[in-house]
Image (cartoon, grey):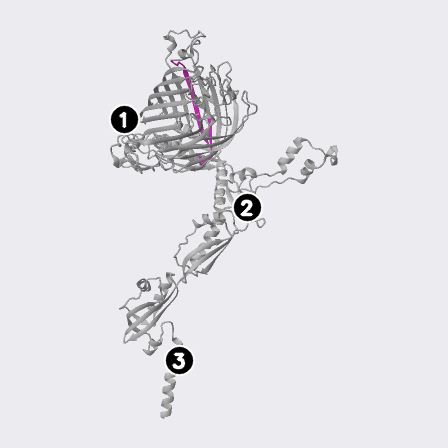
Amino acid sequence: MKKFLIIVLVFSTASDIWAQFRRRDRTTTPQASENNLNYANPAEYTIAGIEVKGINVLDKNAMISISGLKVGDKIKIPGDAITGAIRKIWKYGLVGDVSIEVSKIEGTNVYLNIVLAERSRLTAFYFTGINKTQESGLKEDLKLIRGKIVNDAMVRNTELAVKKYFVKKGFLNTDVKVIQERDTLNQDGIKLKIAVNTKSKVKINAISFEGNDNIDDATLKRKLKKTKEHPRFVLHRTILRELFAPKKYLEPAEKVSWKQTKEFLNENIKLNIFASSKFIRSEYEEDKKKLIEYYNSKGYRDAEIEVDSIYNHNFRTINIDFKIYEGPKYYFRNIIWTGNYIYTDKQLDAVLGISKGDVYNKDLIDKKLQFNPKGMDISGLYMDDGYLFFRINPVEVAVAGDSIDVEMRISEGEQATINEVTISGNERTSDHVIRRELSTVPGQKFRRSDIIRTQQSLSQLGYFAPDKVSQNLVPNPAKGTVDIEWKVEEQSNDQIELSGGWGGYYGFVGTLGLTFNNFSIRNIPHLKNWKPLPVGDGQRLQLRMQANGRQYQSYSFSFTEPWLGGRKPHSFTVSLNSSVQRSLYGYQMPDSTTANPTMKVHSITVGLGRRLEWPDNYFTLTNSVSYLRYILNDWDAGLGFSDGVSNSITFNTTLARNSVNEIMYPSQGSTISLSLTLTPPHSLWRGLDYSDPNLDPATKFAWIEFHKWMFDAKYYLPLDNKKKLVLEAKAHFGFIGSYSREAGIGPFERFFLGGDGLAGGFNSFLLGQEIIGLRGYQNNRITPPLYDRYGSVSPGRGVVQGGVVYDKLGLELRYPVTTGSAATIYGFIFTEAGNNWNNYEDFNPFNLYKSAGVGARIFMPAFGLIGLNWAYGFDRLPYAQDRSGSQFHFTIGQQIR
């Protein structure tokens, strides 16, 4: 019996040990076993302590908090509390392994160890298989941050981001593999090797259409703006044989006429050189919408793409097939107006411009109702009369066969009054400078045209980034008012001109110019308002110096107050100038009797201008009075006399209209200017016999008299919807006349044509002249009577140079690289033509010297406008041996003509 009891006891003990071993999970420890932890019968314990092991970077307390376990909690072991804590820690993805062990048990108290294995962290990443340019662009799209935990989601997202980047570039078959590498310098760090194989760019081989019975394939392909077939040249072998086979192999009967050849070429050649054919999914989806919009605009209201198939043509190209359902073509039948009390049906019909029988076009309705860029629209009609709360909803009320009746349901509302106008974003410019440009004034009736005009005015000031000028309308229908907030973003438009050039007989000529376009005289004593100069009142201060040692020096000062008195847009300008030219080597006249012939010019100008309200508020009228004094000392150089003092008192009036939308890169609008400059008719009272051929020129021209007429016009036409591609058309004319035949036209203020249009020390004989550029020809070479000769020979005493009538025409096609506030850069191609005559008998406005070329302009607020031009002059000037040919021009500053 004793033996049996011993056997039973031993078997029972062994069974308990075996059962405990079998049920042992991650919470068991040797210490737990020693404390008789029974997994067959869960027991409740109180957590007496929690320790965290295996971490270097992670915070111990944070991990305990994430687990949800707290000292003092009662849990069952084994039980859901332990399992739930492990799941919570796993959920955050911060560790690669986690387990919870029982450290020891003291009665009903349990001590736990949370054992963690930290995930590796990203220390670096690099690319293989791509170039530096692609790598630089790709890094901006990736969300890889050094120190972040490397997990499966990071690897997967990186692969997707890299592939998406190259798919946008047309590499649809790009393979990306992210490989984790141990960082040898950091045992807990991981480097990612991003291996990229872009393979070949996938291009579109062919696009085909099915079901387009009314619109041909070629038209539909043109409507796919970004989805284009791969450029190719397909030529039938028959035409190749006929074009290139030796004549001896061609029988007379096989010869083809030129007409037949052209017809065959049109049928067999497919040429598309400039189109981009890469496939980008987002652009493709947009093009599908444009395709349906085009169908809708042609009256096919029900048109849809039933199926579009994209499939491989070969490993580099794909084909796209469209199956189109066109549906019937619809027409407008009746336009019904409801809810209109202010305007009659007839008035609204006239603005809408849609008649019964016109092709149904919903997009056209939306434009004519909401915003028509090419003319008046219904919303503009109401909103320009204060009806800000106006609403209109077009509803198709009947479809009969191919005809549709549209009901225009109008809610006119009440007229809105402007309540409050606020300004934000101006840190340098004073509020009053902005408010005086606003057409939106508190208390007046709201008009949409005033909003557009104000935005244009603020953009033209030059103080703010044009694309950042915006307004926020806050209507209050209950009170019938609207609050307007104007938002601006300031940009620096002060300019520092520091330049030098080499030209002609003067050699190096340096220029230093300072232009402050937002100056403030009243802030000069207030140093706290210097940023870094006194700014904020919109005044313009300009200082300029140009010199080449003693040979040429010019100093100028100009100040403009755009709102004299601060109440009305009446501008006041005063300018001073002093220039001197010296011939240190007596070049101007070889027989000069003076060691250093000189010409000095001193001038002062005072001007007043004002903005007009009629015919519209784009017009300005400017009047100015100038006094110039020319002092010649043995200086002839094309003036007809060499010694003496000439005085000029002139009155100038200029009527101008400026409606361009921006200053530096206008994309629409126009500028027109008509200027008249008059001197007193001194010959009427001076008592001189101007018909006497022996009259001393110095005496004759002691007081200069003339009248000068100048006309300048520029027109800007946007050629795309984004108003980037812009065509500038321009025309310039100038005429100088005299009051009497005997007095004639004097030697001053004549026209010098050709080159970059820059006046000053870069060219000889320019003080007292009107300089006009014509690219493709050397500076001032289109100047009668010597034309090309005066650059290489002395003009001779008594010879008067310069034209009395000129004209110039031009076209310039522009496209911007950037138009941001930091810089405006655009490239262009141009053609222009002009001529210059010294008498009206020879004047022929169609006998012009022509040129064409390319160039770029760079505007930076600190340095002004810089122009680079290459032009080719197609014509030969009088006295020149060859046509003008290739010319390079460099310009600084905005050229007026």
- Estimate how packed mark 2 is, as few (under 14), some (14 to 19) or many (20 or more) residues with alpha carbons within 10 Å: many
- Specify start and end residues of the magenta stretch as a single range: 703-729
The Cα atoms of the two marked residues, 2 and 3, are separated by 70 Å
- Marks 2 and 1, the one that precedes in the sequence: 2
Q: Is mark 3 on a helix, strand or loop?
A: helix
Say what amino acid the circle numbered 2 marks.
Answer: Lys
Based on the displayed image, in which of its 4 quarters is residue 679 positioned? top left
Label drawn at residue 567? 1
The residue at which mark 2 appears reads as: 203
Q: Is any atom of residue 724 visible in this view?
A: no
Residue 422 rendering spot, x and y as whole percentages: 28, 36
The secondary structure type at the circle numbered 1 is loop
Q: Is residue 817 left or right of residue 573?
A: right
Residue at the (60%, 39%) spot, across then down: 270
Query: What's the amino acid at mark 3?
Result: Trp
Q: Does the magenta stretch include residue 237?
A: no
339 lies above or below 705: below
